[in-house]
Image (cartoon, helix red, strand yellow):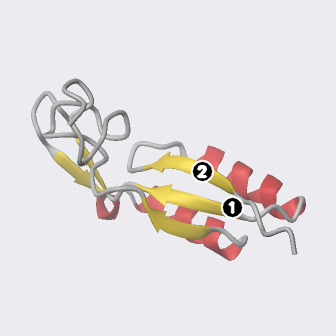
Amino acid sequence: DKGRIFVRIEDVHAFREPKNLVEIADYLSSKNIPFTIALIPAYVNPKNHKVITLSESPEIVKAIKYMQDKGGTVILHGYTHQYKKEEVSGEGYEFWDGKKDE
């Protein structure tokens, strides 16, 4: 047994394009390639600190469910994937200050 590998669909949050996610799932499924969906459930705008959750993006939720139906596995990729709400969700570290390296 050589183990398994998978493709990770990175930074899936409320502002991803649902059509692209569906296309990715269709392609990977057609090639029998296992994949995970690295989910960020809360997107925070660093300018006004407004939190947008997946529940406010029904088309993204629908796309994620479709991806699961095509064999994708959801993994949590941080709640906001940003440090102290200073960065855009998905671009920073959630539990690490990259600037101070701590």
Q: Residue furthest top?
A: 99
Q: What secondary structure is marked by label 1?
A: strand
Q: What secondary structure is marked by label 2?
A: strand
Q: Which of the two residues, 41 or 33, is positioned nearer the viewer here?
A: 33
- Tell me the crowding category of disc 2: few under 14, some 14 to 19, or many 20 or more residues within 10 angstroms, Cα based: some
Q: Badge 2 is on which residue?
A: 9
Q: Are marks 1 and 2 in contact (CB under 8 Å)?
A: yes
Question: Could you tell me residue 16's position as x and y percent?
Answer: 48, 43
Q: Badge 1 is on which residue?
A: 35
Distance (Cα) linking label 1 and label 2: 7 Å
Question: Could you tell me residue 23's position as x and y percent?
Answer: 72, 50
Q: Quadrant of residue 26?
A: bottom right
Question: Could you tell me residue 92's position as x and y percent?
Answer: 31, 35
Residue lying at 11% horizontally and 39% vertically, measured from the top left: 49
Q: Which of the two residues, 84 or 31, is positioned nearer the viewer here?
A: 84
Q: Quadrant of residue 39?
A: bottom left
Q: Can you say which quadrant of the picture contains the C terminus?
A: top left
Disc 2 marks a residue whose amino acid type is Ile
Residue lying at 62% horizontally and 53% vertically, measured from the top left: 8
Question: Could you tell me residue 40's position as x and y percent?
Answer: 37, 54
Q: Quadrant of residue 93?
A: top left
